[in-house]
Image: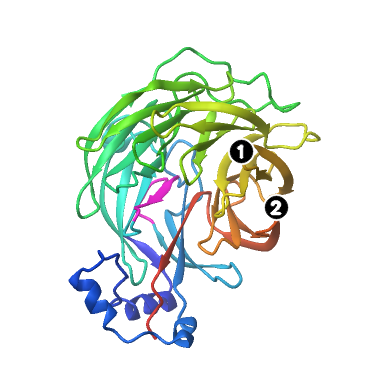
């Protein structure tokens, strides 16, 4: 695997090579007793050696249908005091890593390759990396077929046993077994959605919206488990449905839930969704009409019951827009949405019953904002701006949820996704 790394950063990685990360140990275990016998770290020493925060950024490279300026998969280090991102390395032997996800334990990173010609087949692929817990360096483990063209999203099951992939153009989604070393194993499930042709535009569009979403066939745009891990949900932007499946953890097969899907507004193109921490509330983002659907979720049956629909643009907005990313604040009091074309960020306050009130909408200061991500401290919100070739950041007011632009631009080609990882402090 090739990477562009500065000499200064390379030296840091060498110094950190022997550092061992923390692990969770069972209560009463022998290893835990050994750890307990170590002398405590002085508070001032711990303050002097803060834990490192890495930021992984994926995007579109020249290879793949969209085309882009990304060099590959890029790693930055975040300054927790200022929010600034410093480039560490760019891993170039990967094609269009347009969506990435970390394993629950932070030891592995998985990336879709949004292409349609893997191994000369009409398929995309998925790449697995191991993360050095001292330096943050990535080591490629393997690459496997995704089971369909142009995979747009992937996630890791809460158990860490399966990587789940949504193939947008291919109209399929699959589950891949994770091997003990983090590499990707056999495909346990491959499903192709089907349904009637839906309109390219929703009837409840923002006024003057000329943007359309592709409804020519099934287009799974997101796949993710509920917090309990019992169910797997798939947002299909082509069929305007959110599917619900029960997962068999033994063999990685999916069984339709009692109610197999919930229909969204025709033409609305459900794109992404977010669960509340308790798994009883679901926020579904529809791309074409820039709406958020608030729904109750039954963690026993998987039933989705919509109860509110709100716009992610203010009433004064007129023109073309497509909603892109959706994100809950760490304290689950606020919800954030990025709007492409309109180049805005919407801030919603969440009531006790889960209903939303739009409290702010601000300019992204960039073009075609997609993924949103909070840093681990929760003080900064970052946006991947595909057409501006930049990441912008915003300071977050934890009391009001409102955000203020930092005027910090991080240059990176065609970014589409962001993941943060906290590492142990660098040894002195």
What's the residue at 34%, 81% (across, down)?
15
Seen as rendered, the residue at the extreme right is 316
Horizontal side, residue 323 vs residue 423: left or right:
right
| Front residue (pair 23, 114) | 23
Q: Quadrant of residue 227?
A: top left
Residue 412 at x, y = what percent? Answer: 53, 57
Q: Residue at x 33, y 68 (%)?
A: 133
Image spot of residue 236 (x, y percent)? 46, 27
Q: Pick the quarter of the image with the C terminus.
A: bottom left
Give coordinates of residue 199: x percent, y percent: 58, 16
> Residue 143 magenta-drawn?
no
Q: Which residues are magenta?
A: 92-104
Q: Nearer the viewer, residue 415 or 190?
A: 190
How many numbered marks have been drawn onto this rendered protein structure?
2
Disc 2 element: loop
Q: Which residue is under mark 1? A: 353
Residue position marked by numbered label 2 in the rendering: 365
Q: Residues within 10 Å of mark 2 (few under 14, many from 20)?
A: some
């Amino acid at each position: 695997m090739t990477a562009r790394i500065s000499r200064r950063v390379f030296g840091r990685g060498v110094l950190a090579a022997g550092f061992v990360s923390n692990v969770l140990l069972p209560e009463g275990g022998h290893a835990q007793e050994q750890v307990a016998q170590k002398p405590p770290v002085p508070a001032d020493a711990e303050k002097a050696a803060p834990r490192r925060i890495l930021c992984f950024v994926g995007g579109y490279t020249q290879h793949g249908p969209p085309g882009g300026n990304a060099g590959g998969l890029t790693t930055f280090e975040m300054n927790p005091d200022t929010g600034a991102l410093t480039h560490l390395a760019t891993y170039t032997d990967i094609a269009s890593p347009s969506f990435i996800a970390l394993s629950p334990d932070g030891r592995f990173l998985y990336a879709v390759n949004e292409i349609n010609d893997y191994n000369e087949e009409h398929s995309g692929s998925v790449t697995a990396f191991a993360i050095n817990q001292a330096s943050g360096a990535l080591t490629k483990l393997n690459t496997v077929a995704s089971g369909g063209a142009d995979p747009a999203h992937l996630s890791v099951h809460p158990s860490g046993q399966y990587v789940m992939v949504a193939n947008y153009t291919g109209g399929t989604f699959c589950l891949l077994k994770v091997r003990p070393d983090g590499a990707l194993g056999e495909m346990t499930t491959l499903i192709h959605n089907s349904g009637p042709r839906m309109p390219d535009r929703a009837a409840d569009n923002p006024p003057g919206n000329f943007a359309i979403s592709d409804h020519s066939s099934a287009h799974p745009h997101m796949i993710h488990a509920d917090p309990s891990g019992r169910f797997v949900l798939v947002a299909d932007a082509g069929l305007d449905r959110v599917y619900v499946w029960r997962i068999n953890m033994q063999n990685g097969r999916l069984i339709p839930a009692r109610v197999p899907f919930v229909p969204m507004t025709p033409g609305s193109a459900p794109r992404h969704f977010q669960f509340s921490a308790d798994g009883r509330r679901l926020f579904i983002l529809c791309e074409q009409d820039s709406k958020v659907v608030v729904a109750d979720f039954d963690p026993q049956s998987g039933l989705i019951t919509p109860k509110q629909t709100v716009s992610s643009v203010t009433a004064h907005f007129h023109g073309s827009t497509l909603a892109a990313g959706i994100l809950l604040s760490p304290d689950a009091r606020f919800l954030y949405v990025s709007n492409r074309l309109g180049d805005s960020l919407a801030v919603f306050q969440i009531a006790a019953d889960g209903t939303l009130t739009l409290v702010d909408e601000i300019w992204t200061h960039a073009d075609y904002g997609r993924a949103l991500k909070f840093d681990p401290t929760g003080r900064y919100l970052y946006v991947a701006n595909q057409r501006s070739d930049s990441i912008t950041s915003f300071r977050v007011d934890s009391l009001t949820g409102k955000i203020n632009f930092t005027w910090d631009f991080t240059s990176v080609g065609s970014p589409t996704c962001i993941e943060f990882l906290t590492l142990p402090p660098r040894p002195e």
